[in-house]
Image (spheres, rainbow, N blue to C red):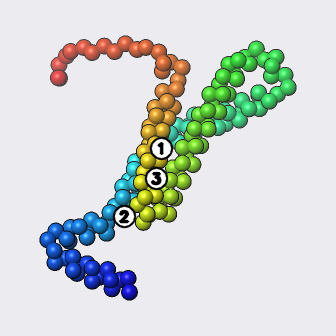
C-alpha cells in the first residue's frame, strides 16, 4: 500500500513544474549524505594508513612494552637514566593511546554510517564526529611525523637564483 501511495504521489508531482528535480533530490538526499560521509572516512583512512605505517615501522608498541618492563623493575628507581626513561615511556604511552583511540573511532564511525544510512538526523551527528576525527587524524599525523628531537629546532633555507627558472 505504501508503494502504491508513493507511486501515485510521484505521478501527481511529476506533472508539476520542477517537481521531478524535487523528487529526485528528495529520494537521493539521505543516500548521498551517507555517501559523502563514506568519502570523508575514506579520505581520513588514507591519512590513517600513513600513521599506521609510521607507527609500526618505528616499533612504538614494542618499545613501549620494553619501557613498561624496565619501569616495573624493583631497582628502577636506582637507575641513573630514570628520568629519560620515564619521559620516553610517558611520551610513547600517549602516542599509543591516541593511535588506538583514532583507530577505534574510525572503525566505530564507519559502522555507524552503515547502521544509520537512512536516518538523516543521526547522520548529521555522525558528520560532526567525522569532521572532528578528520582534524584529529591530520593533527596526529603531523605531530607523529615531526616527533624527532631535531624537528623542533630551527633551520636555514637558502634559495639561490640560477638557470632554469
| x and y percentages locating residue 23 in the rendered image | 25, 70
| x and y percentages locating residue 114 in the rendered image | 47, 62
Question: Within 10 angstroms of label 3, few (less than 14), some, or many (20 or more) residues?
Answer: some
> Of label 1 and label 3, which has the lower sequence position?
3
* Residue 163: image tag: none
* Residue 31: image tag: 2
| x and y percentages locating residue 156 in the rendered image | 37, 13
State which quadrant residue 121 falls in: bottom left
Q: Is residue 153 above or below residue 139?
A: above
- Mark 3 sits on what residue? 126
Q: Is residue 128 above or below residue 38?
A: above
Towards the viewer: 73 or 114: 114
Structural distance between the alpha carbons of marks 2 and 3: 14 Å
- Residue occupying the point 42% across, 51% down: 127
Structural distance between the alpha carbons of marks 2 and 1: 21 Å
- Mark 1 sits on what residue? 133
Q: Element at badge 2?
A: helix
The residue sitting at the right extreme is 74
Mark 2 and mark 3 residues within 8 Å of each other at the beta carbon: no
Mark in front: 1 vs 3: 3
| x and y percentages locating residue 77 in the rendered image | 80, 19
Mark 1 and mark 3 residues within 8 Å of each other at the beta carbon: no
Q: Element at badge 3?
A: helix
Query: Where, quadrant-wise, is the N terminus in this rendering?
Result: bottom left
Structural distance between the alpha carbons of marks 1 and 3: 10 Å
- Residue occupying the point 36% across, 63% down: 30
- Residue occupying the point 16% across, 78% down: 15
Amino acid at each position: 500500500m505504501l508503494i502504491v501511495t508513493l507511486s501515485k504521489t510521484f505521478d501527481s508531482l511529476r506533472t508539476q513544474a520542477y517537481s521531478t528535480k524535487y523528487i529526485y533530490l528528495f529520494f537521493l538526499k539521505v543516500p548521498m549524505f551517507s555517501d559523502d560521509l563514506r568519502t570523508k572516512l575514506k579520505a581520513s583512512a588514507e591519512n590513517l594508513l600513513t600513521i599506521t605505517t609510521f607507527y609500526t615501522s618505528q616499533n612504538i608498541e614494542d618499545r613501549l612494552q620494553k619501557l613498561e618492563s624496565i619501569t616495573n623493575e624493583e631497582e628502577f628507581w636506582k637507575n641513573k637514566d630514570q628520568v629519560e626513561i620515564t619521559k620516553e615511556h610517558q611520551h610513547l604511552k600517549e602516542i599509543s593511546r591516541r593511535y588506538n583511540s583514532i583507530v577505534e573511532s574510525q572503525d566505530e564511525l564507519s559502522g555507524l554510517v552503515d547502521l544509520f544510512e537512512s536516518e538523516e538526523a543521526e547522520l548529521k551527528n555522525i558528520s560532526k564526529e567525522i569532521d572532528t576525527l578528520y582534524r584529529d587524524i591530520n593533527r596526529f599525523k603531523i605531530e607523529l611525523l615531526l616527533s624527532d628531537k631535531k624537528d623542533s629546532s630551527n633551520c636555514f633555507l637558502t634559495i639561490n637564483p640560477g638557470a632554469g627558472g
